[in-house]
Amino acid sequence: MAENPLLQKAAINYWFFIELEKIPNQNSGAVQIHIKNIYDNIISGTFDEFDKDHQRGMIRSKIIIGPFSEKHQAENSMSLYKNVSRGILQKGSEQKENDITYSFFYVSPYSGDSIKGIYLEPIPSRVSTGSQEDFIASLDVGLNFEKLAIGPFPNYKSAEKAKFVYRKNVFDASYVNNEKNESLKRMVRKWKSLKFEIVRKAQGHEADKFRYRFSTGFPQNYFEPDAVQVIIITANYNDKVHTSRTCFSLQGSDVLDNNYSISSERSTTYVNFLFFDKYNPARITGFLFESFIYNDAEMIDLEPVFIDLK
């Protein structure tokens, strides 16, 4: 079987490794995670190399953090993990981060005397967004409950693509499930048949945003029960300068995450209210719909769809 085309892309990514240990809380006796060691070297390579490094790292009881599209993003993340491991809850090396929205998610690592390496337990953990301070708080609090926050990623799409690798490498990642691969390909064939409706609505509470009602109908048997679909909608403006983007994820009925669930057994109409930046006097002239789907075996980019507004 041919390799996933997504994993053949030559774009360079950056990541680093950490080691964990579990220790009992001296007051409550509850088990907590402690960041034992953070390796200083930033590793670079393709997405495929990141995926393989992730698998090798867990065999050696190391967890990979990444992948980041820029080296400075990995350096900033490393700085945050080091600070939290020392009990210093402050910003990392990024400058002027106050206006940046980051994305991150939780994993649940575990190990034991009877198993080799470290494993990731499947848990409900949708991608969250927030400031760098929000990520720091999530990382610090999560350690108390044996959860490790992964990030912070510069955008939602990067976090979801990273999450695919962490999900795929839960338990034993050495096998390839052809049935799972085929199930995603069925979704690929049906993607272009979806009909998107996006309508301008009255302005909401945010005066600096355009408000739109988005809806689409998912027919019966479209959504595979174990699949996640990430949809990225980019608004194009008539000044040809500005853009604005929003992202969201949907999931099949068997997925543990807390995204909106679409049944495969019946047709479902999905409705969401979306907000795009307002740049007066520019107006929105169309929307680009990009999407990718994944399960715990494969990830596939779907063909983009563009809708022109009359």
Image (cartoon, grey):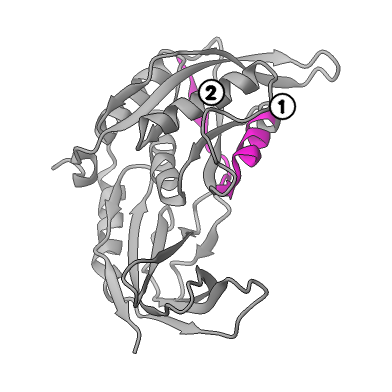
Q: Quadrant of the C terminus?
A: bottom left
Q: Which residues are magenta?
A: 117-140
Is label 1 in a helix, a strand or a loop?
A: loop
Which class describes the residues within 10 Å of circle 1: few (<14), some (14-19), or many (20+)? some
Question: Residue under circle 1?
Answer: 144
Q: Position of residue 198 (x, y in %)?
A: 44, 81
Which class describes the residues within 10 Å of circle 2: few (<14), some (14-19), or many (20+)? some
Q: Is residue 169 visible?
A: no
Q: Looking at this view, is 252 or 308 the one in front?
A: 308
Q: Is residue 295 visible?
A: yes
Q: Which mark is residue 84?
A: none
Instruction: Examine the rendered structure and indicate whether residue 16 appears above or below residue 126.
Output: above
Q: Position of residue 101 (x, y in %)?
A: 54, 49
Is residue 151 rendered to the left or right of residue 169? Answer: right
Query: How far separated are the C-alphas under marks 1 and 2?
Result: 20 Å
Q: Looking at this view, is 209 or 163 the one in front?
A: 209
**Residue pictured at 51% horizontal, 78% vertical:** 212
Specify the quadrant of the image occupied by residue 264: bottom left
Question: Residue under circle 2?
Answer: 79
